[in-house]
Image: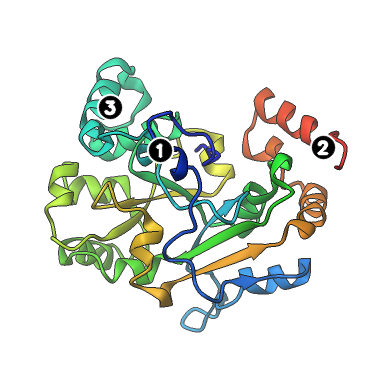
Amino acid sequence: MRYQDPSTRSAGLPADAAVREPASASPNPIRVSSWAEIQDVLFADSWVPEIGRYRSRYAFRGLSDANYPLETTLMRLGGGYAQLERHLLRNFRKYAHRRVVERDSVWHWLSVAQHYGLPTRLLDWTYSPFAALHFATSNIDKFDRDGAIWGVNYIAAHRMAPELLRSRLEYEGANVFTVEMLSESVKTLAELDQLRDEPFTLFFEPPSIDDRIVNQFAFFSMSSDPTLAIDRWLADYPDIWMRIVIPAELKWEIRDKLDQSNVTERVFFPGLEGLTAWLTRHYSPRG
């Protein structure tokens, strides 16, 4: 799983498309003012009376800049990206070694391709609000601007999925799809796109490809329309999401407290890459 900084774009996008205010941004976003307040907001509505446990139903995504849209890497490719999607995936399957996937399905291949950085219609999310906080505050070059955490109720999102997919979740007694469940229900992206004229969004868990997927508590969202950013889709469903704005002046405190809690690159990116990223950031001077 890679949280690619949305400011990293190809030259194919217009210059004025680099950063836009999400169309779905609430007129009253939740702007926190303290470490304690952000904990309360992130874990609000997590009590599930049916089971007597605290189990949040939100998918979280942290952004270093509050103005970044929820665009996929495929969208950032620019040009006729929707038509290029099948070519990208076809050639990835052709040149990647087949041992990288446990099963030859489009959903397995998409998961692996996204994980290793191929532009896809998938978007990275996490079950962990602390992982989202990490990704909102890991880029110290962005500490002069507000960050944000998006939260989407994936159970509510799935209520708007086509009957074929809703019934599969009900049959499994699950809240989120697996690649196996999708493979047995929908064979291709074209078949997914044709399930219903009105676009919908799914959340699914990838295979545990490596420790990054596991440690980041990661899963993906996917739209039936590759040209529709999820924040645009969410604009029609204001009751199923929240957008928490993290003021720039609060980022250092959050960052230091996350580091003390061992919520760092060293954990989320096991190996020398994560270790060097953590050490570089940890020893960088403030200001």
Residue in the picture at 66% in, 25% down? 273
User: How would you rate the neighbour count of disc 3 (Cα within 10 Å): few for under 14, some for 14-19, many for 20 or more?
Assistant: some
- Left or right, 225 with reference to 110: left
Q: Whole-percent x and y of residue 241?
A: 46, 70
Amino acid type at circle 3 is: Leu
Secondary element at tag 3: helix
Residue on which disc 1 sits:
14
Q: Whole-percent x and y of residue 207?
A: 40, 40
Q: CA distance from mark 1 to mark 3?
A: 22 Å
Residue on which disc 2 sits:
282
Determine whether 75 is above or below 173 in the image: above
- Left or right, 177 with reference to 40: left
Q: Whole-percent x and y of residue 172?
A: 28, 62
Q: Whole-percent x and y of residue 284?
A: 84, 34
Residue in the picture at 62% in, 34% down? 269
Determine whether 95 is above or below 106 in the image: above
Amino acid type at circle 1 is: Pro
Dot 1 or dot 2: first in sequence order is: 1
In terms of depth relative to the viewer, which is nearer, 44 or 169? 44
| Quadrant, the C terminus | top right
Secondary element at tag 2: helix
Amino acid type at circle 2 is: His
